[in-house]
Image: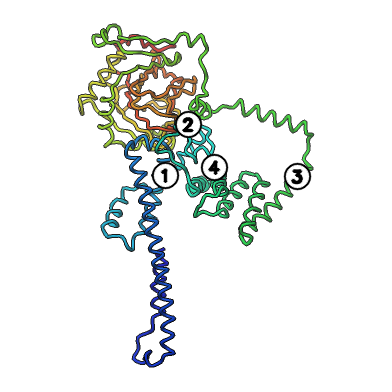
Amino acid sequence: MKMRSVCCVLLISCLLPKCSAHNDFFTSIGQMTDLLFTEKDLVTSLKDYIKAEESKLEQVKQWAEKLDALTATATQDPEGFLGHPVNAFKLMKRLNTEWGEVEDLVLKDMSDGFISNLTIQRQYFPNDEDQTGAAKALLRLQDTYKLDTHTISTGDLPGVTSDLPYKSTLTVEDCFELGKIPYSEADYYHTELWMGQALRQLDKGEESSIDAVTVLDYLSYSIYQQGELERALEYTKRLLILDPEHQRANGNLKYFEYQLAKQRKAEKVQSGTTEEKKEREKRETEKKKSFYPEKRKYEQLCRGEGIKLTARRQSRLFCRFYDNNRHPYYILGPVKQEDEWDRPRIIRYHNIISDKEMEKVKELAKPRLRRATISNPITGVLETAQYRISKSAWLAAYEHPLVDHINQRIQDITGLDVTTAEELQVANYGVGGQYEPHFDFGRKDEPDAFKELGTGNRIATWLFYMSDVAAGGATVFPEVGAAVKPMKGTAVFWYNLFPSGEGDYSTRHAACPVLVGNKWVSNKWIHERGQEFRRPCGLLQSD
């Protein structure tokens, strides 16, 4: 649109008669009639310019009205709104990409104040990395929870009610963008899924600046890269119906046909009977079924497909009122204790932290939240990782009386000395936020894991859940099949070490990706030093 305005200016300058002492247009009606046609062309150009300006203003107006309604809804419940991963992705996309387009649109005619404000605010906008990260989060949720692209595109995610005011949908452009990101990393599987979704929405008549030819170009190539020549050829032919002169598609058509003929010829001379082929396929299928890597078990648990306790083991799990051997604080008001799992023993405490306390902890942590890090097992250096998507902050007991009270509460209930424990860590998970399987304790191959602290290994973990999560976000233990769902105001506790000091490898755990909602947790890692002469009551580790 900006270019069109420039063209209009250039056209006007070209059409206007050149000023010269020798050009006496009034002296020649013939020459003057030429000016009339020049003026007519000028008026036509002026009308085109006015239309362009009106169209531009109308686009800005529509954008403003749409965003006005959206932000009005979003700011009523910011965390709930961003708890829906599609909303979070589209926020990244809007601020990183679309607001830039608005800036280009209004730059010529809007006030300097708006441009200055936008320029100043832009330094705080998400960047390409944020937009890509949000897109990858959607892909991760898609895989973990086995969601099809239509479900994500329509926003009808598990845990999302039909009357949710901030449910969002994906446009053709959104789907196309989600397909381009994995394409840039040679992930043709996800490219196919999202280009296919973009094409289906185009086929249904959705208006878009992305045309079917562009989508089909990506789609056919991604399918070819996965070895499906027949389907790649089919989509290439469809592309050529829309654009017969498409150079790359014409080249691909010949190549795909050649490769397909070659493949079919090879299949004819391939040795082995049909029965032998079926037997080989059966063996391969059984082999795949028997191979359950940790990631697969982790994702199954996240979907609620975990191992179920036998009736006998289930019968040994109880709910009880607990006072930690008649601790003075809990004799009259014992805490509610529930067995979540038997081996390792995982215990949940209900109503263990109040809403007011949780809000204060969040308030203290928010200004300090930084991207959570992991300790590199080789170098020991703290670094960010794709398998840990969250931000965290650390709160010391001396910083606020509430933190000190929480620490004391943990000590009173567990019977463990927290003076040598690490500071209270507060974490908030982002879009599709997760922490893949890991140990809290230092293994034998990490002898210096907590050497700088000088407090020994992490003997136990205490984890507060400070929010409910509509879908996803469970704490799972892939080695044993346990899955603990977030429940606001509760805390879970488990020992990482056996009484002998050896690490309990069954405590390897993970935080599942948050599908819908906003997950806040805080945890306390309790260390060995200071526990020598203390014997916790009621929470002895199972052997």
- Quadrant location of the C terminus in the rendered image: top left
Q: In this orientation, does residue 442 appear?
A: no
- Residue type at numbered disc 1: Lys
Q: Is residue 36 above or below residue 500?
A: below
The kind of secondary structure element at disc 2 is loop
Q: Position of residue 366 (x, y in %)?
A: 28, 35
Q: Is residue 517 above or below residue 531?
A: below
- Which residue does the numbered mark 3 point to in the structure image? 266
Q: Position of residue 378 (x, y in %)?
A: 42, 33
Q: Which image quadrant is residue 187 in? A: top right
Q: Position of residue 137 (x, y in %)?
A: 45, 39
Q: Position of residue 384 (x, y in %)?
A: 38, 38
| Side of 222 where 520 appears, left or right | left
Cα distance, mark 2 to mark 3?
46 Å
The kind of secondary structure element at disc 3 is helix
- Residue type at numbered disc 2: Pro
- Residue type at numbered disc 4: His
Q: Which mark is residue 90?
A: 1
Q: Residues within 10 Å of mark 2 (few under 14, many from 20)?
A: some
Q: Give the label, 4 or 1, closer to the camera.
A: 1
Q: Is residue 161 above or below residue 202?
A: above
Q: Give the label, 4 or 3, closer to the camera.
A: 4
Q: Residues within 10 Å of mark 1 (few under 14, many from 20)?
A: many
Cα distance, mark 2 to mark 4?
21 Å
- Which residue does the numbered mark 4 point to in the structure image? 190
